[in-house]
Amino acid sequence: MPLKDYLITEEPYYQSTGKEIAHFEAAYADRMPIMLKGPTGCGKTRFVEHIAYRLRKPLVTVSCHEDMTASDLVGRYLLDANGTVWQDGPLTLAVRHGAICYLDEIVEARQDTTVVIHSLTDDRRILSLEKKNEVVRAHPDFQLVISYNPGYQSVLKDLKESTKQRFGAIDFSYPSAKLEAEIVCHESGVEQAVADKLVKIAERSRNLRGHGLEEGASTRMLIHVGQLINRGVPLGEACDVALVLPITDDPDIRSALGSAISACA
Ligand SMILES: Nc1ncnc2c1ncn2[C@@H]1O[C@H](COP(=O)(O)OP(=O)(O)OP(=O)(O)O)[C@@H](O)[C@H]1O
């Protein structure tokens, strides 16, 4: 099994927040490409890990960035003692061997990269390795999943309509307060009462979105705060280190967050 290192053998902890598991599994039955939409740190990656485990499929994850080229995805010739050898990139690996390929923040990647996925995400289901002069037909189990944060997009940096329209989409947002507190307890080890406070603080920070903050505190940030508290750092200081300072440099917003923290602590 060439992709055995990519199989998730232990069930990743995931709290479902709606019908996302059923919708994904229905889409997977037809290998429909899926886009996970939502803010940073709200559980998209954890969800796809959980789904890959449920479906018993290997998961190949690629974090996209602006310097990423098509070759980083599909592969390239490398020099070795015997001359040049072809090395499959992560996408080609997934296509050949039937993994779920998760392209995180694909909009960050250059246009030539996004175009590579077009022939894979319509009924052709093929990947052209132009440098190798090979066309790879997707394994029947292959599925493409991308993530997309609508908050970050601008006219200059957005997926082309012809890319978007190849995907079904599942919306993610922060979990309800009760669920989010449960997640923070589970992931950081803090008590319920502390997790409840952190979730209240996060809610207040999310209300500042569009009023000086690009995004409010994510579930991931709350877990970081909880982890510091678990190491003996007082709540206010933990919030400073893992929430206020990373999220903004604006003194007014820092002070607004500080007041929210004092009110909830
Ligand atoms: N529904 C959930 N069930 C379990 N854990 C969750 C859930 N939502 C968030 N988490 C926790 O929050 C952390 C951050 O979530 P995750 O890495 O999945 O975010 P993301 O949406 O993929 O972020 P990014 O867009 O920045 O990659 C996870 O490692 C996990 O600990």
Image (tube, rainbow, N blue to C red):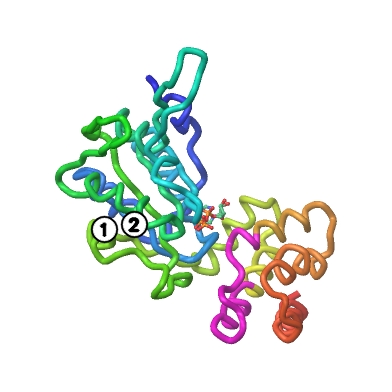
- The image position of residue 16, as x and y in percent, is 43, 55
Q: Which residue is located at x 29 percent, y 42 percent?
A: 143
- The image position of residue 176, as x and y in percent, is 49, 68
Give whichever of 101, 7 is nearer the camera: 101
- Which range is magenta? 202-222
Relative vertical location of residue 233 with respect to residue 30 in this rendering, above or below: below
Relative vertical location of residue 44 with respect to residue 101 in this rendering, above or below: below
The residue furthest left is: 123
Q: Quadrant of the N terminus?
A: top left
Amino acid tagged 1: Gly
Reading the image, the residue beneath label 2 is: 35
Q: Quadrant of the C terminus?
A: bottom right
The reply to whether the magenta stretch includes residue 203 is yes
Give whichever of 18, 90 is nearer the camera: 90
Residue 147 sits in quarter:
bottom left
Determine whether label 2 and label 1 are within 8 Å by CB: yes
Q: Which residue is located at x 66 percent, y 74 percent?
A: 201
Mark 1 lies on a secondary structure that is strand
Q: Is residue 230 visible?
A: yes
Distance, label 2 to label 1, CA atoms, is: 6 Å
Q: Mark 2 or mark 1: name the one nearer the start of the chain.
A: 2
- The image position of residue 106, as x and y in percent, is 41, 55
Amino acid tagged 2: Met
Reading the image, the residue beneath label 1 is: 168
The reply to whether the magenta stretch includes residue 120 is no
